[in-house]
Image: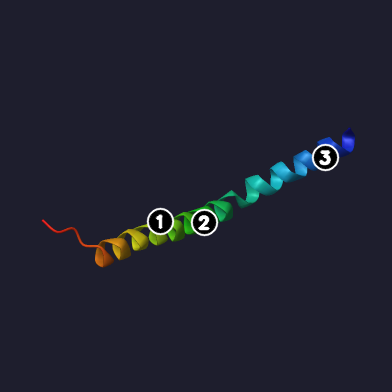
Amino acid sequence: MQTIQDGYKTFSLLISINWDRLLYVFAIAASLFLGAYIGSLMMEAMTHPVGY
């Protein structure tokens, strides 16, 4: 049980020290997905224009 508690404390310490790095990774991943989504919408609009 002591080993599990020590492991949890160590993991918590690593997260508290490196939270900004994790935030940067998530922000970059989110921007890549958002860019791909917007790009796919633009490609769809360019290849299938809506005629009025």
Q: Which residue is mark 2?
A: 24
User: Quadrant of residue 7 in the image?
Assistant: top right
Q: Secondary structure at mark 1?
A: helix
- The numbered mark, 2 or 1, whose residue comes first in the sequence reads 2
- The numbered mark, 1 or 3, whose residue comes first in the sequence reads 3
Pair 2/1: label in front: 1
Q: Residues within 10 Å of mark 1 (few under 14, many from 20)?
A: few
Vertically, is 47 above or below 22?
Answer: below
From the viewer's side, name the closer residue of 47 and 11: 47
What numbered label is drawn on residue 34? 1
From the viewer's side, name the closer residue of 32 and 45: 45
Q: Position of residue 42 (x, y in %)?
A: 29, 62
From the viewer's side, name the closer residue of 45 and 33: 45
**Residue type at the position of mark 3:** Asp
- The numbered mark, 2 or 3, whose residue comes first in the sequence reads 3
Pair 2/3: label in front: 2
Pair 1/3: label in front: 1
Q: Position of residue 48 (x, y in %)?
A: 25, 63
Total marks placed: 3
Q: CA distance from mark 2 to mark 3?
A: 27 Å
**Residue type at the position of mark 1:** Leu
What numbered label is drawn on residue 6? 3
Q: Secondary structure at mark 2?
A: helix
Way the structure is coloured = rainbow
Q: With 37 as the anchor, is 20 left or right in this view?
A: right
Q: Secondary structure at mark 3?
A: helix
